Image (cartoon, helix red, strand yellow):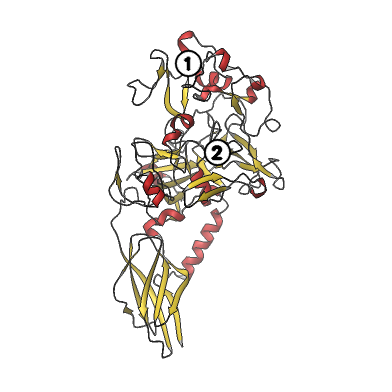
Amino acid sequence: MLVLNTLYSVAVPRLAFLAALLLHSSVRADPLLSSWFTEGSTKYARIYTSTANRTAGISTTIWTGQNAIQSQPTYAGVHEIDYSNGWVYIKNTGLAPYIMGPWDNPNLPKNQGTSTGVYRFPRSPLVISSPATTGRTLTGQGSIGFLVDGVAIYNTSDGFSYSVANAKDAAPNANIGPGDGVWNRDAWPNEKVSFDFPLNHPQPSGQYHAHANPIGVRYILGDNINYDSSTKFYSENTLATDWKHSPIIGWINDGLPLYGPYGYSNPTDPTSSVRRMVSGYIFRDGTRGTANLNSTGRKSLPIWAQQAQNKTTLTSSQWGPNVSTAYELGHFSEDYDYLGDLGFSQGADFDLNKYNARYCVTPEYPGGTWAYFVSIKADGTPWYPYNVGRWYMATPPAPIGLPPSPGNVSTLTVMNADTPLTQYYKGSTSTIETWSSTPVTVSGSTVTLSWNSVEGGIYKVSSSSDLTTWTDLTGTVSSAGNSATKTEPVNTTTTQKKFYRLTRTGMATYDSVGY
């Protein structure tokens, strides 16, 4: 008979372990700490470099593009979380834990970590409860928040607008600046051809980001998404009887959570049915009291855009192009009206306010919270304003000695000056390995040991019969993923007792910028 025991190499003192448990129990109630998806931090980020490779399931951990060179593997997603009384800080590469790409786009993603950069979110958002836009902060270009897998969230715009003088859109390849700023291009209809299957894409800086319905992170969180492993295609689960309340899929810079598209039908009753949240925005096509741009032309702004641009009326030099095949309705953000500006009521006629938020109870906030929701149509197609409206719902508080920063892009100096600061999570190469759920398998005269590893880790396994004298098994193991194994021949004709010890002895070279 063969008796096998396993022993993990890193011993944690009982007192220290108890203290760690007490520490985490005191902060576990804060979803801003606990909702980050950290399971991907022990594996390399990967992309498909072509449609053929995606079909064949061939991905790579290093790549070279027009704008970005990822010459060494780096790890996916969020790899550190720290907090103070007022702020939560994350460090991440900005690269998703699922396989990204390919893109009809010359840009490729790359590690967004820097040696001095972190992102911060206020733990106590300053919500402006008034529906008026006065005093609110407009969302700008670049990241307006992060998905819980570390991927950046961008606003509705692609950064370009119509140029009346040139009678066409400004665009990167048109040698025209950003445009007039009156009729602003909506990223979803104008850039969706460059999105990958998870509905994200990289910008020239290499920052991989989401403008609309981030379906990839929704899938890994179990948010009513189907995935076909053969086609690599994501799709909305439209079977209402299967729906459950969406999880928190991201955090916006103002400190409010972003949920997927599904919430309680009664915002204050967690026992009410779950349904898709309805956006407050509709096309300006003449329905429900909207102006019909198909007949009037783009000669006026909707009320919300008048407020955002501080323009009540437009001169002929500010008119947009007529609705046409080249400039379909929805081409510009200003092609949408907000129903609340037309006399309709949130809660009766639609669910989400001008900022794409509502006050409601959720599984994470049984006492209620303001929260953003992803807006989609019944078939899963993204719908304006997608994640967040033109303004933030809340305003970040100012840390002592610093001005408010709606972008929440901080520096390591600021983070280190925020005291007392506590580390909540540190993953990637700092992750402590564990034996797998079935650590020992005996087959004939061999024993196979299995453990959960850090990709790129180099491991040594030792054995002992008395826990005193240890012998290293021949050869090391280099982990090519998140699991590793080691096989040893044993004599099964006699009764034995063996203990095994696992030690990580090194790491393969990786892009460690930002760690």
Q: Residue at x 43, y 34 (%)?
A: 193
Q: Is residue 475 above or below residue 36?
A: below
Q: Which mark is residue 363?
A: none
The residue located at (53%, 32%) in the rendering is 392
Few, some or many residues within 10 Å of mark 1 (<14, 14–19, 20+)? some
**Residue in the picture at 48% in, 51% down:** 37
Q: Nearer the viewer, residue 32 or 236?
A: 236
Q: Tell how many labels.
A: 2
Whether residue 28 is visible: yes
Q: Residue furthest bottom?
A: 494
Q: Where does the image place residue 257, in percent across and percent down from the top left?
A: 55, 42
Where is residue 436 shown, x and y percent of the image? 46, 68
In the rendered structure, which amino acid carries the disc numbered 1? Pro
Which residue appears at 66% of the width and 44% of the height? 361
Tell me the quarter of the picture where residue 432 sits. bottom left
Identify the secondary structure beneath mark 1: loop
Q: Is residue 432 left or right of residue 106?
A: right
The residue beneath circle 1 is: 321
Q: Position of residue 16 (x, y in %)?
A: 46, 66
CB within 8 Å, label 2 to label 1: no
Q: Position of residue 282 (x, y in %)?
A: 60, 26
**Pointer 2 residue:** 125
Q: Report if residue 412 is visible in the image.
A: no
Tell which residue pokes out farthest to the top in this image.
316
Q: Earlier in the sequence, mark 2 or mark 1?
A: 2
Query: Residue 259 lies in what quarter of the image?
Result: top right
- Mark 2 burial class by Cα count in 10 Å: few <14, some 14-19, many 20+: some
Q: CA distance from mark 2 to mark 1?
A: 40 Å
* Left or right of residue 240, residue 465 in this image: left
Query: As shown in the figure, which amino acid type bears the numbered disc 2?
Result: Pro
